[in-house]
Amino acid sequence: MDNESDRQAGREPGPGTSEGREPGTDGPFAPQPAGGEDAPREPSAAPGDESRTSDAEGKKRRIRRRVLRCVLAALTLLLLPLLTAEAALRVNYTGTPKPGTTTRHQDALWLGHTWVDGRKTDQDVRKLAQRLRTTGIRDLFVHSGPLEDDGTLPDSAYPKARWLISAVHRELPGVRVQAWLGDELATESPDGMHLERAATREAIVASTRRVLAAGYDGVHFDLEPLHSGDRHYLSLLDRLHALTHARHALLSVAAHQIDPLPGFHAFWGATTNHPKWWSQAYFGQVARRVDQIAVMSYDTMQPLQSLYGGYVAQQTSLALEVTPDTTGLLMGLPFYHENRFGHWAHAETVPAAVRGVRLGLSRTDADRARFGVALYVDFAATDADWRAYEDDWVR
C-alpha cells in the first residue's frame, strides 16, 4: 500500500493570495500604477460573478454526490447477492449430522507419481499399509501420467506399476489401485489437449487399454479445465466405459464443483473466461457414464471454515441428487495447505470438510451405500489431517 503520511498536505490561503494582500499595498502611500492616478486600473469583479462561482461549485458538489450514490448503489447490487449467498452457506453449516453418516469403507486417496517411477520401496508400501489399514480407504488413485496433449502415454511414465499393484494387493487385500491420468485441456488457451479432435480421443482410449494391461484395477481421469456441457468428454466416457467394463475394471473421474447458484458457471465464464463449475444436469450426465465420480470440493474461494463447510454440505447435496445409486460418489477433502487465490488453508480444513459432508449426506441421502471421501493428496498431508479424517469420519 502507498504510505499516505508521505504526501504533503495543501496550505490554507495566506497573504499574497486572493484572500489577502501584502502589507503596504493599500492606502494613501501604496505604489501607484505607472502613469499616475489617471492610468487605467485592473478591472474589478463584475456584479454577479461571485454568485455564478457559488452556483458552479454547488453544481459540482451535487454531481459528486450523485456519482457517489450511483457507486454505492452499484456496490450494493453486487455485494448483496454475495452476502446473501455467504449467509446461506453459514446457515447450511448448522445442525447435527445424523448418526451413522460416517465411512462406508468406500474412501479414496490420491497418491503422487513417486509410487510408480522407482523412488518408492517395499518398506514405503508397508508404511502406507500401516497408515491405511484401519481407515475406510478402498481406492488408491496413483499418478501415472500425465497424458501427452495428443492423448498418448508412454509405458516409461509408470515403470514400477506392476510392482506397486502387487505390493498393495499383498499388504492391503481388497484395496484397488487405479491409474490417475490427466492433462490440461485447450479450453481457455491455445495450448493443451483438444478433446474435440477424434484422433485425440482415440489415442486416450488406446492409452487406457495399455494401462489396464499393466495390471491396474481401474483408470481415474482428471482433465481440466473441463467446461460444463462438453459433449466430446461425454463421448469419450462412453468409449472408455465400454473398454473398462469389458476388462472388469473401474472407470473413475475427478469432477468440477456444481453451480452453487443455477447458471453460475455461465456468469463466471462470461466475466472471467473460466467457468469453473458444472451445471448440476451436466454433473449427472457424467456420473451416469462412470463407475465412480470424485468431486474436487476444495479451492472454493471461501474465507472461513464455517462458510467452506457450508459450501461442502451444499455440494454434497447437489451431487447426491443427480448421482445414480450404481455410481460411487466421493467428496474431496483438502489434505494440503496452500495459501493463494481461491484457497485459504485456515478455512479449507479437513474438520470443516468432513462436517460439511456429513451434513449434506444427512439431509439428502443418509443411507447411500456407494459414498465416501477422497483425500487429496498423500505427499502434502499432515498428521493432523489424518487424525481429523479418522476421528471425524472413520471413528
Image: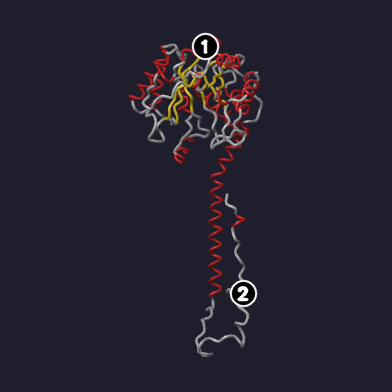
Q: Residues within 10 Å of mark 2 (few under 14, many from 20)?
A: few
Which amino acid lies under the numbered mark 2 shown in the image of this protein?
Pro
The residue at the point 38 percent across, 33 percent down is 191
Amino acid on which the number 1 mark rests in the picture: Ala
Q: Which of marks 2 and 1 is in front?
A: 1
Could you tell me residue 322's position as x and y percent?
A: 50, 24
Q: Position of residue 9 (x, y in %)?
A: 61, 62
Q: Residue 223 at x, y = what percent?
A: 44, 27
- Whether residues under marks 2 and 1 lie with C-beta atoms below 8 angstroms apart, the answer is no
Residue 386 at x, y = what percent?
Answer: 62, 22
Badge 2 marks a residue whose secondary structure is: loop
Relative height, residue 273 to residue 12 (above, below): above
Pick whichever of labels 2 and 1 is earlier in the sequence: 2
Q: Residue at x 61, y 70 (%)?
A: 13
The numbered dot on residue 106 is none
Residue sitting nearer the eye, 291 or 9: 9
Q: Name the residue under label 1.
A: 167
Q: How far apart are marks 2 and 1 (CA)?
A: 92 Å
Q: Which of 334 and 60 is in front in this view?
A: 334
Q: Name the residue under label 2.
A: 15
Q: Nearer the viewer, residue 68 or 120?
A: 120
Give the answer, above or below, for where 191 lies relative to 164: below
Quadrant of res 105: top right
The colour scheme used here is secondary structure
- Check disc 1: other Cα within 10 Å, few if <14, some if 14-19, many if 20+: some
Residue drawn at 48 percent across, 38 percent down: 268
